């Protein structure tokens, strides 16, 4: 299916947000996620189904000051 990830169109196979992170090689990283501009907690990613045209944002925390 075709979705948008961080502003770029991508063809993906994953049916859920959690599996998308695995597909993108981010499954073991601490990241923040949003689906269609709504924050998704890490514990809820398994239940968030992806659909054609969805927009996903993935953000890695940064340290510094």
Image (cartoon, grey):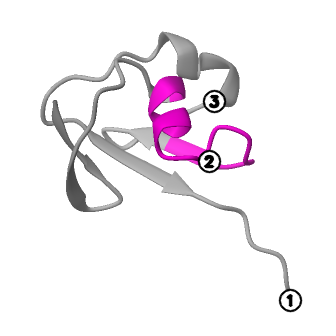
The residue located at (22%, 35%) in the rendering is 54
Local secondary structure at mark 1: loop
Residue found at the very far bottom of the displayed protein: 65
| In front of the other: 11 or 62 | 11
Label 2 and label 1: CA atoms lie apart by 20 Å
Q: Give the camera-side residue of 19 and 45.
A: 19
The disc, 2 or 3, on the residue closer to the chain's N-terminal end is 2
Reading the image, the residue beneath label 3 is: 41
Q: Position of residue 39 (x, y in %)?
A: 51, 38
30 above or below 51? Answer: below
Magenta-drawn stretch contains 48: no
Between marks 1 and 3, how big is the CA–CA gap?
A: 25 Å
Q: Is residue 22 above or below residue 7?
A: above
If the image is split into quadrants, where does the N terminus sit? top left
- The reply, left or right, for residue 6 in relation to residue 52 is right
Query: Where does the image place residue 37, in percent across and percent down from the top left?
Result: 36, 44
The CA distance from mark 2 to mark 3 is 8 Å
Q: Quadrant of the C terminus?
A: bottom right
Check contact, mark 1 vs mark 3: CB within 8 A.
Answer: no
Query: How would you rate the neighbour count of disc 3 (Cα within 10 Å): few for under 14, some for 14-19, many for 20 or more?
Result: few
Classify residue 36 as left or right of residue 30: left
Instruction: Please report the residue visible at 53 percent of the width from the left and 43 percent of the height from the top.
Output: 33
Give the residues in magenta. 18-33
- Labels 1 and 3: the sequence-earlier one: 3
Check disc 1 and report the residue beneath it: 65
Quadrant hosting residue 43: top right
Q: Which mark is residue 32?
A: 2
């Amino acid at each position: 299916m075709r979705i948008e990830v961080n502003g770029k169109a991508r063809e993906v196979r994953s049916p859920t947000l959690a599996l998308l992170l695995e597909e993108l090689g981010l499954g073991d990283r601490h990241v923040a996620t949003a689906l269609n501009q709504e924050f998704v907690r890490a514990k809820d990613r398994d239940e968030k189904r992806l659909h054609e045209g969805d927009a996903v944002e993935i953000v890695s925390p940064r340290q510094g000051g």
